[in-house]
Amino acid sequence: MKWDHVIYNGNIVTPEDEYQANIYIKGGKIVSISAEELDGEAEETTDASGLSVLPGLIDSHVHSRDGGSTYKEDFYHSTKAAAAGGITTVFEMPNTNPPVNNAENFKNQSENLKKKAHVDFAIWGICLGDINLKDLQGLDKSGVIGFKYFWGYAVNKKTYQLIYNYEEGMKDVIPPCNDGEVYQMLEEVTKTEKTFAIHAENSDLINYLTKKMKETGESDYDTVLASRPNLAEEMTIEAGIAMAKKTGTRLHVLHVSSAEGVDLIRKAQEEGYPITAETCPHYLFLTNEDYEKIGPSMKVYPLVKYKKDQEKLWEGISNGVLSFVCSDHAPHTEEEKKGNLWNVPAGMCGVETLAPLMLNAVSDKKITIRQVASLLSANPAKQYGVYPQKGSIQVGSDADFTIVDMNKQSVIKKENLHSKSKVTAYDGFQVKGMPVRTIVRGTTVMKEGKILTEPIGNLVTPWSS
């Protein structure tokens, strides 16, 4: 037998098990997993002795700004950063320009991104209320990974950028949808059996509190945080769950940041409803107390909150309320992130630092390496209908692997990031546990931090499409 690639002597890690074996790859697929060495030659071999071999890691929440504000980031750089950070598949968000709001734009975006993709990718569809309600079924059939609704946000009609603080009468703006429109979107998405994912913030409350807090003349982090409190997330999650109970929707809550949000989701799950949720490293590794040291680079929406919220989020990971962790990669330029905290945009780089931070959590004994295989691979693959093609080490699955050295220590440095913009809250963070090889469908894309290939990524669509 002529193998394309053989990985020898690795400690294979799945959510359920760890074991020593060799992995044999041909045609981009896993064709054999064996403790014994099989006959045959290989075009490429990898000695994974002393290393852990995880199913290729997935970042299900990435904003690459392509098309649109590509001076901040583009798909070529974001997927290079993904590969450098051990990510083998990214799910690209749909609020681009043009947006992924109908089947034609999905097709055009697929073609646009494929030319630039260093790793495999899926694409979200956007829900804009009445504007594209009739297009959701076409998006489903085209192959979107799921549907996203930015609850509480207005959208610029020309650029499709989010408007954080909507005011009535704004020109060229799609205003936030009312509850009836949201309910109608849930009804329509339910027909597809795909996930309806929400950015959960209550715009009416935020607008009122923002005006009130700005009147104080203060612009410190805790004052800004008071304008977007836990209650803004809590109210929206509560409304989303209530609607999903009636419509039978597979509701997913994006980037959960509050203790109250975790409790609401846990209660719905205990009642048997298909409500799922994720969180991000910035909520797990930062609190409001870090702002004085880090500064505006850590401004994201929803805002990073308090120690009690961070502790509840880790608890949510431990007990399975939170299904996975993703980056919400959303770069801005360093210049844009300077100035008054009220005015700087929300978002930062994250796709390259996601895996190192979570592996460091393994070293700190907050989670196990098997949980990393769940949180960053198997769980998102199952949630979005691409398992076992992705997220699995078994015969027939795509030969995607993230090989990690749990003894390797490193320091995250913003100048070393592969994204176009380098804004990160983790500059100077010391980590133990690093991805040392990224393999996409049998091809080594990254080795010891170096990108070895030009774009080879393919579009991934859910089985239901």
Image: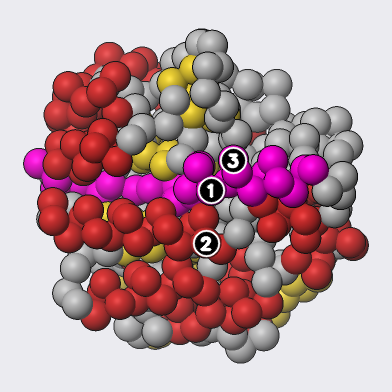
**Residue furthest bottom as drawn:** 365
Which quarter of the figure is the C terminus placed in?
top left
**Foreground pick, 248 / 229:** 229
Cα separation, mark 2 vs mark 3, equals 13 Å
Q: Is residue 309 visible?
A: yes
- Considering depth in this image, is 403 or 257 the residue closer to the camera? 257
How dense is the environment of label 2, judged by Cα within 10 Å: few (below 14), some, or many (20 and up)? some
* Mark 3, residue position: 207
* 347 in relation to 16, above or below: above
Residue type at mark 1 is Leu
Quarter placement of the N terminus: bottom left
Residue 411 lies in quadrant: bottom right
x and y, in percent, of residue 427 in the image = 83, 56
- Identify the secondary structure beneath mark 1: helix
Considering only order in the chain, which callout, 3 or 2, is on the residue closer to the N terminus? 3
| Label 3 with label 1: CB-CB less than 8 Å | yes
- Measure the C-alpha gap from mark 3 to mark 1: 6 Å
Query: Residue drawn at (71%, 46%), measured in percent from left and top?
Result: 212
| Amino acid residing under circle 3 | Asn
Q: How is the image coloured?
A: secondary structure
Mark 3 Cα-neighbour bin, 10 Å: few <14, some 14–19, many ≥20: some
Stretch of the chain drawn in magenta: 189-215
- Residue that carries the numbered disc 2 in the rendered image: 231
